[in-house]
């Protein structure tokens, strides 16, 4: 039996800017660190305290960005895309190479039902995927 995971030959992904990963209908969490909140504050030209108070919430022992109450979309999602894209949290930068999506070909293809960029575009090598999974994110 191989010591390599099922995606050892790599996986294709290309962000299609569909914004499905940023939008409802279900409530979720966009985990954010204090360092990331500081970067968001700088981008928005606001204080750290203001961003923490008005754009995040405590959730399950961590912090999450707020969502629109009606749509459950990330509040930084606009009709033109992510308004904080250059400083988006690590969770956003590592999509779709999350552990839950990489458990099996079935979980990867299940994620592809919501994300049209999965299984198309450039090939990410095993090494690139592992680098992303180790919290380095995708450089864009």
Image: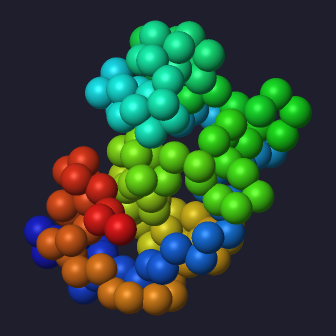
Residue 117 in the figure: left or right of residue 69 = left
User: Which residue is pictured at 30% across the width and 80% down the height?
Assistant: 124
Quarter holding residue 132: bottom left
Q: Is 64 on the left-hand or right-hand side of 127?
A: right
Taking the image as shown, residue 79 lies to the left or right of residue 85, namely right
**Percent x, y for residue 2?**
14, 75
Q: Position of residue 113 (x, y in %)?
A: 67, 71
Res. 20 visible in picture: yes
The quadrant the N terminus occupies is bottom left
Of residues 54 and 118, the one nearer the viewer is: 54
At 65% from the left and 59% from the top, the residue drawn is 81
Q: Is residue 115 left or right of residue 97?
A: right
State whether residue 130 is above or below residue 43.
below
Query: Which scheme is used to colour this image of the protein?
Result: rainbow
Q: Residue furthest front?
A: 45
Q: Residue at x 45, y 73 (%)?
A: 105
Residue at x 58%, y 64% (from the top left corner): 111
Q: Nearer the viewer, residue 131 or 76?
A: 76
Residue 64 in sight: no
Image: 82 above or below 38: below
Quarter of the image with the C terminus is: bottom left
Residue 99 percent across, percent down from the top left: 37, 52
């Amino acid at each position: 039996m191989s010591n390599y995971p099922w995606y050892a030959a790599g996986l294709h992904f290309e962000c299609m800017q569909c914004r499905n990963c940023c939008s409802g209908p279900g409530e979720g969490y966009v985990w954010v660190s204090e360092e990331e909140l500081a970067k968001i504050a700088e981008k928005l030209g606001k204080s750290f305290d203001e961003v923490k108070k008005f754009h995040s919430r405590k959730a399950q022992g961590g912090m999450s960005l707020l969502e629109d109450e009606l749509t459950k979309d990330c509040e930084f999602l606009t009709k033109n895309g992510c308004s904080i894209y250059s400083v988006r949290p690590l969770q956003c930068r590592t999509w779709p190479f999350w552990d839950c999506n990489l458990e099996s070909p079935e979980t990867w293809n299940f994620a592809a039902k919501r994300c049209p960029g999965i299984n198309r575009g450039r090939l990410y090598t095993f090494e690139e995927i592992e680098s992303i999974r180790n919290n380095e994110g995708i450089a864009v």
